Amino acid sequence: MNREAGMPLHTRIFIGLAVGLGLGLLCNIVLPGDPRVQWVVANVAYPAGQIFLRSIFMIVIPLIFTAIVLGIADLGDIKKIGRIGLKTLLFTVVITGISVLIGLTLVNTVKPGVGLSEQSRTALIGALSNNEKVSGIVTSAGEAKTPIQTLVEIIPRNPLADAVYAFDPEYRGGGLLSVMFFSVVFGVALAVSDPRRTAPLVQGLQGLYDVIMKIIEFAMNLAPYGVAALIFTTASQLGFEVILVLLKYVLVVIAALAIHQFVTYGLIVRFFARLNPLKFFQSIREVMLTAFSTSSSNATLPTAIRVSSNELKLNRDIANFVLTVGSTANQNGTALYEGITVLFLAQFYGVELTIGQQLTVVLLSILAGVGTAGVPGGSLPLVVLVLQTVGVPAEGIGIILGVDRILDMCRTVVNVTGDITLAACVDASENRASAKDTGVA
């Protein structure tokens, strides 16, 4: 591996995280609302963080296409591709369902939305009516597609348009899911074509993939500084008053995410992937830190692919396929967060949800988890859509905006860990199937 001699990358990322967080909180406490801090955020920290994020995002589309196409083409066996796809789908639905149930159980037990004083509740509700950010999210949710529309639009009319506008929040097309669908179809077609005629294309795609990996290596050298800038921006702007009001909600979300992260995934890794959970989490610590700092499954995808192959020694083709699809379709942490948020806001507004309505929240959260863009804040319009479905005021989304960034960081860690857990399980399952086919015990 091409790493700098001495301090490992994940250690440098953690130092950047600690420095950015410490300075940000210090500024928030000592210089709240100070124009000098605002200037540093607007002209130094935010641009520096965005440079790092953009250096990652610029290669996500070519990475998705080449990783999926090469993964399927190298697997070759269509039956094997279908088997891996089915395992990925079943894991996503079942484990996402478990994550949502963990969240709903905890929020129904602790009831974080109950107990606010009437004065605090009235003040918060009143502040929402003039919040432009809230209005924008509600508008986006109002334009959100039904599950049937989402299913139809996964098949792209123009895959290039979906690739170009995949990260545009105003785009109403299939986006990344459509790019993935086209990549899967392209890869399957390549796998069943005459290898003598397609060999130059495969070599060209492999060369493109190698170049993308080198760009990722360049970008990750910026990670410690980009992480520090991103965390400083968040910590310096996050008001402690809002945190105190929403502390119970935040703790419930983090506790549910931690249970799913270390208990659910730990058991799955132990009994299905046949790996030591402690070694597993230690091996992917760089991925978890990158996910936490960027709040983006898509931005973390290159690191997840590299670590899965180099540290966990997973089959590269399986890891490429499963992790690339999972970065958008396997959003366990997001689904858990959405379920808790809907019930919290229902409690806040005094809306009693029946068992049937809560089951609706479970199902919609699973579907929303599959369709959520793996970018910071990508789940908020879908949360509003679920709120509207069960009769909770959509403007309530503004109540949690102040702490959403922190929770976004935490749930992204769970999302990405879920993708790697899925890849490890599929890899172990395929190894057992190969051993059985060859008669090896």
Image: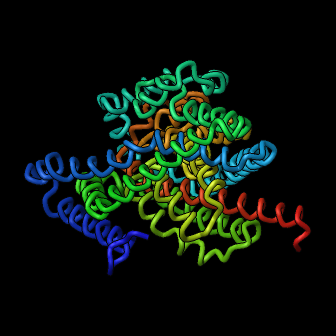
Which residue is at the front of the view, 327 or 164? 164
Q: Is residue 401 above or below residue 227?
A: above
Which residue is at the front of the view, 195 or 166? 195
Q: Is residue 354 above or below residue 109?
A: above
Image quadrant holding the N terminus, namely: bottom left
Q: Residue furthest left?
A: 36
Residue 282, x across and y down, in percent: 53, 75
Q: In the rendered image, which quarter is residue 358 located in? A: top right
Colouring mode (rainbow / by chain / secondary structure / one colour)? rainbow
Q: Is residue 397 visible?
A: yes
Residue 153, x across and y down, in percent: 60, 23
Image quadrant holding the C terminus, namely: bottom right
Q: Residue at x 65, y 64 (%)?
A: 265
Q: Residue at x 61, y 27 (%)?
A: 154
Which residue is at the front of the view, 326 or 196? 196
Q: Residue furthest right?
A: 439
Q: Residue furthest bottom?
A: 6
Q: Is residue 233 left or right of residue 250?
A: left
Which residue is at the front of the view, 130 or 288? 288
Q: Residue at x 71, y 50 (%)?
A: 75
